[in-house]
Image (cartoon, rainbow, N blue to C red):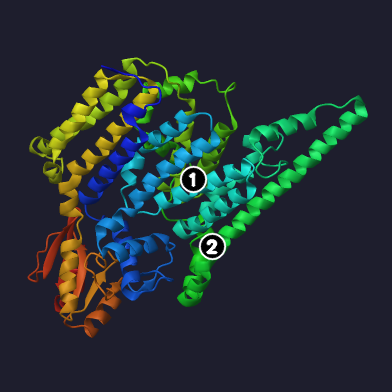
Amino acid sequence: MSIHNRTGAKTASFGVILVLWVLVAVVGVTARPLLPVDETRYLSVAWEMWVHHNWLVPHLNGEPYAHKPPLLFWLINASWAIFGVNDFTARLIAPLFAGLNMVMVALLAKRIWPGKTAIAQLAPMFLIGGTYYAGYGTLTYFDMLQCFFALLGWYGVFVANDGDRRKGWIITGIAIGLGVLAKGPVILLYVLPAAVFAPLWRRDGFGLGIGRKSGASPAAAAGSNAAAAKPAHGAKGANSANGASGAVARDGLGRWYAGMGLAVLLGAAIALCWAVPAAIFGGAEYRNAIFWGQTAGRMVDSFAHVEPFYYYLVALPAMLLPWLFWGGLWRSLFGFGWRRDMDAGLRFCLLVTVFLLVAFSLISGKRVHYILPVLPLLALVFARILADLPTRRIDQIPVAVFIVILGVAGLVAPFLPSFFAKIPAWVGLLEGWWGAFLLLAGLALLVIETGRVAAVGVIAGVNLLLVAMVFMIAAPRLQTDYDMRPMAQYLKTQQQAGRNVAYWGKYHAQFQFLGRLEQPIPMLVDMDEVAQWVSAHPNGEIIARRNNPITGADQPLARFDYKDDHLVIWDAQAVKADPEGVLAR
């Protein structure tokens, strides 16, 4: 079976992919619970903001929460103001921004390559066609928001580059300000390289809106530069012309960086509209945290999530699956005229990508999602170099085999514990029959022959199916071992009955939103604190995590599954009698 479509509009249009993404997002949100500890924590911060009507200073378990800025929490509260307090609409905010990133990638492609409309159609499909991006996009984290504002900032840089400097720098400044409110000043690390390194990716005598009047087209500016560079009659005339051109370039470059500086100031002003009053009302410790501890201090002295320098070089290829299995992409990579056809847009994407990878590699604390904005840049690169040429069916075989293997793995996984004792018992609970859809999709890829452009849409669609099926296969395991709701509801009834509850160990507020708790749960980190709390609350209860059998006479008041062990609730008197015994993990 053959499918050929020059733009891919009929086979896998941008609109169809967006609709598929909406369906996958709904599946991802409904098939699994809020995952502890991050998703439950962020919803709990939003919940405390809602309960206490404190929109300036986010709180977690009754204490100021300075680890993240408030934009996501504001958006969650806005959804609750419209739809009421629920987790469904709150959890759709990150997927919404994942979809908006697809739109921004298309707009950025149109701005960079206005004469190549196919790039604007292909880049969003390359982006959402990545398994990591699509899967991560369903999680309630801050990175999809940050990615959106990075794309918006880059778009503003290109608007300024095209001559509309005022509009471009205003867009960039707004992106920086909202990016700070989304995830902190790290937005500068994403956006500023595009402006700072503009002379490198332009390479046209500083033609960056530099030395041309606002509103002038790039073509007109290029003509002006050519005219200025044309030798005059005689050596004196030539020297005069070259001197004038150099002066214009220097003046233009200065105005370019001045505009960039004003954009940064605009962004700072937007962020300070929240940060200054929040610092005043949040206290000295919170003020120090938001102005230093969670920004430069985190980057310079990061001990959390320490990974080796080469971490991202290993992670990035995995983030680009399944595209790295597609022969059509490799044919384009090797067949593209890199010296002949290298343009400013490609240089921009590659330069910023390399800078971000190097910069984040130099920071000791590393997480895969820190380089999420690299994915839309690479999607633009892939879309730019792709040629709409007939491909051989062999190009799709690696992707098809990858999907088929995953489908077969899903089908057989529930049976493995019966044959292999070392396979965890929970594997037998997986809904493996969903793997049949992946198996069929992989087999379809083996028989469908497409042009390279049409193939992008087909593979993107199959990838979305893959993500949805993984959620459905894993749903029983996630619902059984990661759902904090039953325990949160128990704690709600205890608080309503007037019983005090504390947590032994590090508490991440997993239960505050899910139980709609309005009282904080004290955190006990050593035996002295336990003894003091039990003495003050003789009728209280203490939550502890345990993976060893309970052999003593005392039994917990309640027990709930969590991952591979349990969360148990002890009566305060049982803890008082044998604290080290009952609280032992």
**Amino acid type at mark 2:** Ile
Question: Where residue 544 appears, x then y in whole percent?
Answer: 21, 66
Q: Residue at x 69, y 32 (%)?
A: 222
Q: Is residue 185 visible?
A: yes
- Compare residues 305 and 326 and report the one nearer the observer: 326
Taking the view exactly as shown, the residue that stands out farthest to the bottom is 536
Instruction: Please name the residue that numbered disc 2 is placed on.
Output: 270
Q: Earlier in the sequence, mark 1 or mark 2?
A: 1
Label 1: state its secondary structure.
helix
**Amino acid type at mark 1:** Leu
Determine crowd level at label 2: few under 14, some 14-19, many 20+ residues with C-alpha closer than 10 A.
many
Say the numbered circle drawn on residue 151.
Answer: 1
- Compare residues 205 and 110 and report the one nearer the observer: 110
Question: Where residue 58 appears, x then y in whole percent?
Answer: 40, 69
Q: Quadrant of the N terminus?
A: top left
Q: Residue at x 43, y 50 (%)?
A: 306
- Quarter assignment of residue 439: top left
Residue 74 sits above or below residue 577 on the image: above
Determine crowd level at label 1: few under 14, some 14-19, many 20+ residues with C-alpha closer than 10 A.
many
Task: Please give left or right for residue 61 compared with residue 6 in the image.
Answer: left
Task: Please give left or right for residue 87 compared with residue 369 in the image.
Answer: left
Label 2: state its secondary structure.
helix
The alpha-carbon separation of the residues under discs 1 and 2 comes to 18 Å
Residue 528 sits above or below residue 565 on the image: below
- Compare residues 309 and 219 and report the one nearer the observer: 219
Q: Residue at x 34, y 14 (%)?
A: 392
Residue 381 sits above or below residue 364 on the image: above
- Quarter assignment of residue 233: top right
Task: Please give left or right for residue 454 compared with residue 308 in the image.
Answer: left
Question: Where residue 539 appears, x then y in whole percent?
Answer: 16, 82
Dots 1, 2 in contact, CB < 8 A: no
